[in-house]
Amino acid sequence: MRDISHKLAFAHDGKAARYSDVFDPNNGTVQARVALGDKALLDRAVEAAKAAQPAWAAVNPQRRARVMFNFKALVEKNMDELAYLLSSEHGKVIADAKGDIQRGLEVIEFCCGIPHVLKGEYTQGAGPGIDVYSFRQPIGIGAGITPFNFPGMIPLWMSGVAIATGNAFIMKPSERDPSVPVRLAELFSEAGLPDGILQVVQGDKEMVDAILDHPDIGAISFVGSSDIAHYVYKRGVDNGKRVQAMGGAKNHGIVMPDADLDQVVNDLSGAAFGSAGERCMALPVVTPVGEKTAIALREKLIPAIEALRVGVSTDPDAHYGPVVTAAHKAKIENYIQMGVDEGAELVVDGRGFTLQGHEEGFFVGPTLFDHVKPTMRTYQEEIFGPVLQMVRAESFEEALKLPSEHQYGNGVAIFTRNGHAAREFAARVNVGMVGINVPIPVPVAYHTFGGWKRSAFGDTNQHGMEGVKFWTKVKTITQRWPDGGGTGDSAFVIPTMG
Ligand code: NAD
């Protein structure tokens, strides 16, 4: 069986005391096993990072940017191989796997401009003969801990900005689909990144805890489920680290009575069921406003959902593939049963879905619930599968309240032709990322990604200028160059610039 190991700056035989199975979700078989690293391995990786980082921070920013340009070209050259690898472990269809890598690559494109971004600020003549300037310096050693659902994009969100700003970075991918981050790190080496600046350590909770407790790791970026995000945030901060920890989501799509329903149905099909619903920016809740909207939307949604094509991840005609593991499939199907037990109307039931020739694959058919109530557990919790829940609202105010009062606040979308309603909604909704007639409002790389409430712990977002802030510390210099001579008077009161 194939073994998946780490990408380290020192010689290692790849063997481990513990391993975790990596499945082929299309067939339900074990396709590889991944070595689970421990504290001793992390200690060595940190030593290698410490040795390499000062020289990397001293490389001028345009040279660091050149590595980013080279890396971008290499990823583009190897896109097909990377997408197949990603799809074979995750289960998302190939076109979607390419999108996963492409969205990460857009952060690398942002990083190609790092010399401009790091220019700093300068005030000449802030006081008599006094100039003030500030610049950003790397934290030193950063670490990233990532979820299974975007094994290309999320490691690149973190590693790109951390490295471009002069840090050494240690990546701990999800043990469920661990291969793509290793391949990306190999391409970074090929692009000219010095040894020790990007290392990949595989592992589970044991490795995460070692990262959280390591005294030489200064900043940790985490993306995953909310309970683990909260744990990572608390333990990391208690250990004096800078931590950003993104968590789960339950994004709503609000459909106003004047929305173009055909467009909404197209948008919802992709946003609720694409990648089998395993996206933190999926739209698993739809809220039609008014009875007439609900009836008309439901009428159009049912045939669209029934027409969705579920297939193996290499099928170019499939809309979505299997979910990641048998355990995740069971969890989704349990939630569907819970929805029935709670009294929601199961309109399209995706349980028991099988694909000929792939009977053991982890497939879940598209599922639609109607008459879901905010008091139901299946509404309050994240399902993370191909399940769309319709929660009807009588008015704009009631619809606005639903995402605003939900425990998660990652993304939300409103579908309307009314600019005033959209503007009002965007201003008042208690959620971090808003789409107006855009179903998956993942901001572009030079803006910034992050939710509110239990969708994100810490106060700095991913990528864009927020990412640069997270991976750097600002230093401010106040300088005076006297032209010689006298010493001036001592100042016993706080100096002001007059
Ligand atoms: P997860 O929380 O199970 O795992 C995330 C990481 O934490 C993995 O690297 C894993 O090894 C590690 N981990 C797991 N259990 C741990 C424990 N007990 N202690 C310490 N570390 C542990 O998440 P997942 O299932 O891989 O990913 C899906 C989740 O990620 C969903 O909740 C989804 O909404 C969320 N997500 C959020 C965003 C965002 O930006 N807000 C983006 C993508 C995914």
Image (spheres, rainbow, N blue to C red):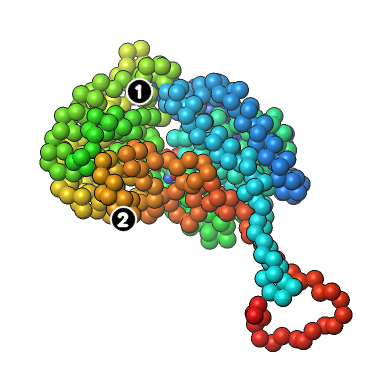
- In the rendered image, the quadrant that contains the N terminus is top right
Q: Quadrant of ligand 1?
A: top left
Residue 321 place in picture, x, y as percent: 38, 23
Q: Residue at x 29, y 43 (%)?
A: 414
Of residues 157 and 339, the one nearer the viewer is: 157
- In the rendered structure, the answer to whether residue 460 lies left or right of residue 324 reads right
Q: Label 2, on which residue?
A: 428
> Is the residue marked 1 within 8 Å of ligand 1, measured from its CB?
no
Q: Secondary structure at mark 2?
A: helix
- In the rendered structure, the answer to whether residue 220 lies left or right of residue 257 reads right
Q: In the picture shown, does residue 377 fall above or below 3?
A: below
Residue 464 place in picture, x, y as percent: 54, 47
- Earlier-in-chain disc, 2 versus 1: 1
Q: CA distance from mark 2 to mark 1?
A: 34 Å
Of marks 2 and 1, the one in the foreground:
2
Q: Residue at x 61, y 31 (%)?
A: 72
Looking at the rendered structure, the number of numbered marks drawn on it comes to: 2
Callout 2 touching callout 1 (CB < 8 Å): no
Judge whether residue 226 can be spotted in this image: no
Q: Label 1, on which residue?
A: 319
Few, some or many C-alpha atoms within 10 Å of disc 2 (few <14, some 14-19, many ≥20)?
few
Q: Residue furthest right?
A: 485
Residue 19 place in picture, x, y as percent: 54, 33
- In the rendered structure, the answer to whether residue 268 lies left or right of residue 128 reads left
Residue type at mark 2 is: Arg
Of residues 337 and 289, the one nearer the viewer is: 289
Judge whether residue 245 can be spotted in this image: yes
Q: Residue at x 55, y 29 (%)?
A: 179
> Is the residue marked 2 within 8 Å of ligand 1, measured from its CB?
no
Determine the image quadrant of residue 61. Answer: top right
Few, some or many C-alpha atoms within 10 Å of disc 1 (few <14, some 14-19, many ≥20)?
many
- In the rendered image, the quadrant that contains the C terminus is bottom right
